[in-house]
Image (cartoon, rainbow, N blue to C red):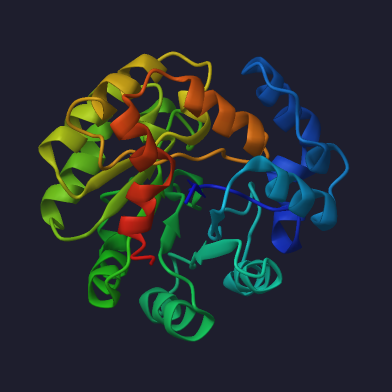
Amino acid sequence: MIIDFRVRPPLGGFLEALLFRESVRTARICRSQRHEPPPSLLQPSWDTFLAEFDASGIDLAVVPGRFSAPRYGQVPNEDVARIVRQGEGRFVGFAAVDVNSPSAADDLEQAIRDMGLVGLALDPGFCDPPLYPDDPKLEPLYRRCLHLEVPAMITVSGRAGPDISFADPVRVDRLAASFPDLQIVVAHAGWPRVMEMLAVADRRPNVWISPDQYAVNLPGASHLVEAANSFLGDRLLFGSSYPFLPMKGALESYRALPFLPEVLDGVLGNNARRLLRLR
């Protein structure tokens, strides 16, 4: 099973989000990483997207919601659940909630229990006001994840906040130490501070790294491969970050990286299958 850990399909709130609303910018980023933009970005279409997915060789993809990010676009849990339903077994969803709401933890539980979503998606640097991953305001959500036994995927990179301090690995290190039983997926791998984030993953066995597009033709990719081939082989996760990369192209790029053969299967799917408790 090949699992893409970060896909944002052209449906519902995603169509109004920055990545589709400013498709020229998204396409420019894609080309800067030596891939042609997916057709379903340039002319957004659910049917075209599904055809791309089915041709990619990917079996399952994680769709993260997004909330509390007014500039970047809101993707409510209802839209994520709709994508999961319409995908007919192709997708699983991570819930996003309004971190400023006193009912945020209860809203998360409702999305997990009633909508069938399987984790929490957080983009703390995009919140209003921006937050770091270890902000006390987020602690009730982390405690509820522990109660529900679901992972938290947190976007951490130099692009995911108003300044590069939102890529600070120390914040993730402190969070992982405070919640040692919480399974934390670091989306974007803290790029460009990849080496430091890998050191956090080495220290904290509850930290998983999902570099997604940042493992493709960008500085730091070799460090991710070296980590996977040594201590991180069971906690590195493949992701395309579609529409920033085409799904098939991202998969081919990961396969071209010098992962050890016994590590590659884990990176491309077995690690995610274990984290998500999939049969």
State the count of labels.
0
Near-viewer residue (45 or 228): 228
Residue sitting at 58 percent across and 71 percent down? 77
Give the side of residue 100 with respect to residue 49, left or right.
left
Give the side of residue 65 with respect to residue 276, left or right.
right
Near-viewer residue (273 or 178): 273
Near-viewer residue (80 or 39): 39
Indicate whether 66 appears above or below 270. Answer: below
- Point out residue 272 in the picture as x, y percentages from the top left corner: 38, 52
Residue 170 appears in which quarter of the rendering? top left
Indicate whether 265 appears above or below 98. Answer: above
Give the side of residue 193 with respect to residue 116, left or right.
left
Residue sitting at 15 percent across and 45 percent down? 205
- Point out residue 104 in the picture as x, y percentages from the top left corner: 41, 74
The C terminus: image quadrant: bottom left
Residue sitting at 45 percent across and 39 percent down? 238
Q: Residue furthest right?
A: 43
Residue 78 appears in which quarter of the rendering? bottom right
Residue sitting at 16 percent across and 44 percent down? 174
